[in-house]
Amino acid sequence: MGADIYGWVEVRQRRTPYWYGIIQISPLLVGSGYETYDMLGCLFGVLNYAHFKPIAEKRGLPTDAAAIIQQEAQKWEKTARDHTWITWSEIEAIDWEEEGEQEDSREHRYIQDKHGQLVYDSKAIFHGRSITDTKGTVYKFEKIRRKEALTPPWQLLFNLMKLLAQQFGGDNVRMVVWFHG
């Protein structure tokens, strides 16, 4: 079972209580497929195959969320789940070297390069145990670090949030999300 992430990055001016939705995140992240799952687990505990301790799991929709975010969340209320949010300050404080609490539930596939070295290729179909096949492909279960969940779409989103935090402050930039699927 998969899940798509929807939501917004919102900001508020210092010394004001009002949030403004300024970046819709689904165009940046939806369609990234399984590559998105590890960060969903890392941040929000959704599809947490890598067994990270989630940073911001099921906090709900903020009561002070920007009007556009409240309207969109209401549109999806019958099918959406696991509403939550996270500030840039919290993302900035993440220990990206931290490993999952146990091995990834999916096998990692390594193939031999032209020099005979094993090179990570992908997450593989479950075989039930670590094996090496006759072509030198190795499948194994292992822990991953949070930084390995940081794919290019997430890097782009975080870079945008970082730029906004320079203007508004880290606690005044947050991502508000929910999931479908």
Image: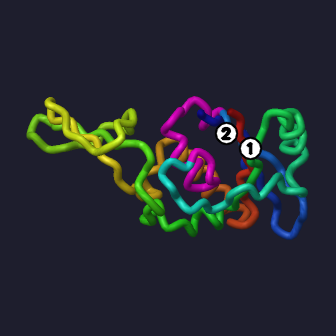
Q: Which image quarter is the N terminus in?
A: top right
In this view of the protein, can residue 155 be seen by the observer?
A: no
From the viewer's perspective, is 85 left or right of 76? left
Residue at disc 2, secondary structure? strand
Q: Amino acid at mark 1?
A: Trp
Q: Residue at x 14, y 31 (%)?
A: 134
Residue 114 lies, in percent from the top left, at: 11, 35
Label 1 sits on residue: 178
The disc at residue 5 is 2
Badge 2 density bin: few <14, some 14–19, many ≥20, Cα 10 Å: many
Q: Amino acid at mark 2?
A: Ile
Per the model, the C-alpha gap separating discs 2 and 1 is 6 Å
Q: Residue at x 60, y 62 (%)?
A: 91
Residue 163 lies, in percent from the top left, at: 62, 56
Depth check: 60 or 156 in front?
60
Looking at the image, residue 84 lies above or below residue 151: below
Q: Are marks 2 and 1 in contact (CB under 8 Å)?
A: yes
Badge 1 density bin: few <14, some 14–19, many ≥20, Cα 10 Å: many
